[in-house]
Amino acid sequence: MSKLLKLFNTVKYLKFTQIYFRLFYFVRARFRRASGFKYSFAKESVSTPLNLIDSCEYYSTHKDGEFSMLNLSKKFDDKINWNYSGYGKLWTYNLTYFEYLKEKEDVNLIYDFIENIESVKDGLEPFPISLRGINWIKFLTKYEIKDKKIDDSLYAQYYILLDNLEYHLLGNHLLENGFSLLFASFYFQDEILYKKAQVILEKELDEQILDDGAHFELSPMYHQLMLFRVLDCINIIENGEWRIENETLLDFLKDKAILMLQWLNVITYENGDVPLFNDSANCIAPTTKELTEYANRLKINFQFSIFNSQLKQSGYRKIKKENYECVVDVGEVGASYIPGHAHADTFNFELYIKSPITNYQSPFIVDSGLSTYNTGDKRDFERSTKAHNTVEINETNSSEVWGGFRVANRANIIKIVEKKDSINATHDGYNKKFGVLHTRSWVFEDDKIVINDIINKDCKAVARLHFHPDVTKEDIKEKIITNHKLQITNYNYAPEFNKTIKSLVVEIPFKKELKVEINI
């Protein structure tokens, strides 16, 4: 019964579109299997040379037959296994994204994929088709490769994508479909693909980019990825030499890019890091600096200043003093109908303090990060309340994260009061189960931050602070002051996929009220 209730509390947030297309694709797949339906993997095409300015580099590499992605490497002895699953589905996806295309001779990897395309499984799902299409077009454009076999295969893949758009998921998945269709429409000068791309991009960007400029899944890394794609689309419209009379979509994309650049530059720390909130990891998306430079090459002018109002709708607040920067999360789980990247982290925060050596802000208290998308205990832990800088009640998550990418009951912010140097907020994530409300306040002084946690009834409460690997026990004892007992233990800090570093975490058990001072 509890499993059915959890499923109901998850499904009730879905949009009708998601439910309809899940059922539609499920039923259609059964009919097609029964009828022996198969896609064609070559479609007669005529491609048009493009002229794109330099974009941003990827992290994936291929050298001497070895593929390196997500901090995991694989060398195939005889032939490439495009379905290799030894590192999990995300690595298989990345293998078929082709982000490692760097040199002209890498075209042989494309030929190999085409030769084996009928046996490809995960790589023919709509998401990897979308990313692969963009990367093939960029690569073919850069090296001025005109190859009928590649073009016909790519064109067929795009019509497979068009038949399987990710309306059952929405969010960044459908956006990636739209971005890629726009690329294809210019490369093949295909009006059908263009019109579908325009409809998706205008509708989804209006919904997914909040008024403060944040992407609504509230992951700084995914925000960087979506901004990257918006800039790429501006690039191709301005330099694609097709439909140059159409300024409507171009102006729309530029307006969204400016909003997104403003939000990203506000939330980014002085040293270039972004908070690792909600499935964010380093070495996946282009950095804020790289994206800003790309925007400058595209002559997109924007200005930003550090005001909390620029982050309000996303639920994040950035507080910047001479000696520290602090980003706190007082927002809702987002987005409500696609919370796959959300964590049970309400009232989480990060703190960077000025280093006497570099004179830049350096990480001190950090989000514990993300190392895997593989469903299981590690994924469950990294999304849990216990893995974040907030309060856990009765060893239970504040939002009911489960199944790798699902959220059932979730914490809601029921009260927030903000002043110039303070934030006070209450969430109800524990109210249904335990009748407990958690109120947290931050007071930001020049040389310290004071955090007060109040629980409205007796229960087992534990506050945690996760520290960057460079922080020592001596640093913690010097800077963290409380009248409760500190327990310093270890945790695995995950700044990148498949990479963890043993670090220190403070656990502070308390009953109804806790005061912690962080001396800067």
Image (cartoon, grey):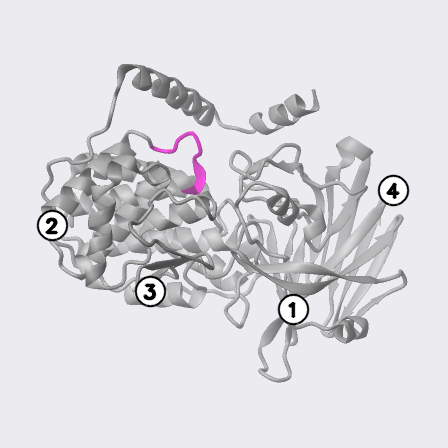
| Mark earlier in primary sequence (2, 4) | 2
> Percent from the top left, x then y, of residue 190?
16, 39
Q: Secondary structure at mark 3?
A: helix
How far across and down, in percent of the image, does residue 22 sit? 43, 24
437 to the left or right of 165: right
- Extent of the magenta region: 165-172
At a point 63% along the width and 77% down the height, the residue shown is 354
Numbered circle sitting on residue 459? 4
Give the mark toward the camera: 4 or 3. 4
The answer, for residue 238, to whether it is visible in the render is no
Q: Amino acid at mark 3?
A: Tyr
Check disc 4 and give the amino acid type: Cys
Q: Which residue is mark 3?
A: 294
Q: On the image, numbered disc 1 is attached to which residue?
A: 469
Helix, strand or loop: magenta stretch: loop
Q: CA distance from mark 2 to mark 4?
A: 67 Å
N-terminal label among 4 and 3 = 3
Q: Earlier in the sequence, mark 4 or mark 1?
A: 4
Q: What residue do we see at 75% from left, 40% from top?
A: 396
Which is nearer the N-term, disc 2 or disc 3?
Answer: 2
- Residue type at the position of mark 2: Asp
Distance from disc 2 to disc 3, alpha carbons, whole Å, reads 29 Å
